Image (cartoon, rainbow, N blue to C red):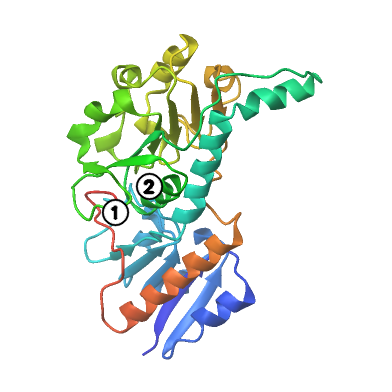
Amino acid sequence: MSTKIIVTGNHTPETIEKFRSFQDTEVVFVPTLNDISPEDCADAQILEGGVNRETVEKMPNLRFVQLFSAGANGYSWLPENIVLANAYGAYGDSIAEHLLTTTLMAMKRIPEYLKMQDRQGWELLSDIVRFEGCNVLSVGMGAIGTSYLRKAHALGATCYGVRRTVHDKPDFVEELVDPTGIDRFLPIMDVVALSLPGTDEVGGMFDERRLRLMKKDAIILNVGRGNSIVTDDLIRVMNEGHLRAACLDVTNPEPLPKDHPLWTTSRVYITPHISGGYRAGINYTRVIDTAVRNLTLVLDGKPPIHEVDRKLGY
């Protein structure tokens, strides 16, 4: 009997061909989970793209789910007999480039010059920061944080990292600590970059106390999940002139409602969660390559790469 595979999303002919190249499989492509027919739900063993409770309840034979996202928190409800894998690493370099861009943007005061251009002004702003020689901390040392520090080190920064358990310190990282060491680092960091999952463990990690531990002219960046920074505390700190800039690709709440005070808080620069995704075509290619590689392993009876620990959320 062939293995039925459901693939969600809109895909290129090349991707469709890759998924259909497996022997003894029947691959069904649907735009969304809501488009899966009752017959396909009843037979499907593998789901590629994403999943929700309602769909799982209709799939009695489901045994493997491949996410096209790197974020994988919020799936603790998934039955233990269903293996879950994410697209870890597929977006890391792209998001690291976004971090690098926003770091330099804030260091060189580019947003202020753009506002100056709108009024056709010609002024020279002082207090410009060099990347070379600065101290950079990545809170989160997965694919994103590691790639960002590699790039920061190449530009002459001294790099530090925080991860849940200390292991495999890269050569370009000066010191690697677990979360208990964050407070020791913050007073000497010029840049603090967050690339944390949206788990309860990291919720509110950067509250007013930690934000005030940072240097007054430091930059904080967040590309992980919005809940790692307490929004009201950040607004208060920024309004009082503490911190050079906060560059946020994620917010809490998200999407950020119109008229929310964070939009107009001085020196807060917001992008609408765009650092990853498929806007860079290479990200799509990497996601599909990851999915196809894992599908090969699972069909051969082997565990996938980057199986998600449902309790940890990654």
Q: Is residue 6 above or below residue 80?
A: below
* Helix, strand or loop at mark 1: loop
Q: Is residue 193 above or below residue 45?
A: above
- Using a 10 Å C-alpha cutoff, classify the residue at mark 1 as few (fewer than 14 neighbours), some (14 to 19) or many (20 or more): few
- Image spot of residue 159 (x, y percent): 34, 41
- Image spot of residue 135 (x, y percent): 37, 34
Looking at numbered disc 2 in the image, what kind of residue is underneath it?
Answer: Gly
- Image spot of residue 176 (x, y percent): 23, 44
- Image quarter in which the N terminus is found: bottom left
Q: Nearer the viewer, mark 1 or mark 2?
A: 1
Q: Which mark is residue 99?
A: none
| Left or right, residue 37 beside residue 53 | right
> Marks 1 and 2, how far apart in space?
14 Å
Q: Is residue 113 above or below residue 298?
A: above
Q: Is residue 216 above or below residue 73?
A: above
According to the image, label 2 marks what residue? 145
Tell me which residue sits at (33%, 63%) in the image: 85
Tell me which residue sits at (58%, 33%) in the image: 105
Tell me which residue sits at (56%, 75%) in the image: 15
Q: Quadrant of residue 291?
A: bottom left
Front-most of residues 11 and 288: 288
Tell me which residue sits at (30%, 32%) in the image: 203
According to the image, label 1 marks what residue? 171
First reached walking from the N terminus: tag 1 or tag 2: 2
| Left or right, residue 180 beside residue 290 | left
Looking at numbered disc 1 in the image, what kind of residue is underneath it?
Answer: Asp
**Residue lying farthest to the right in this orientation:** 120
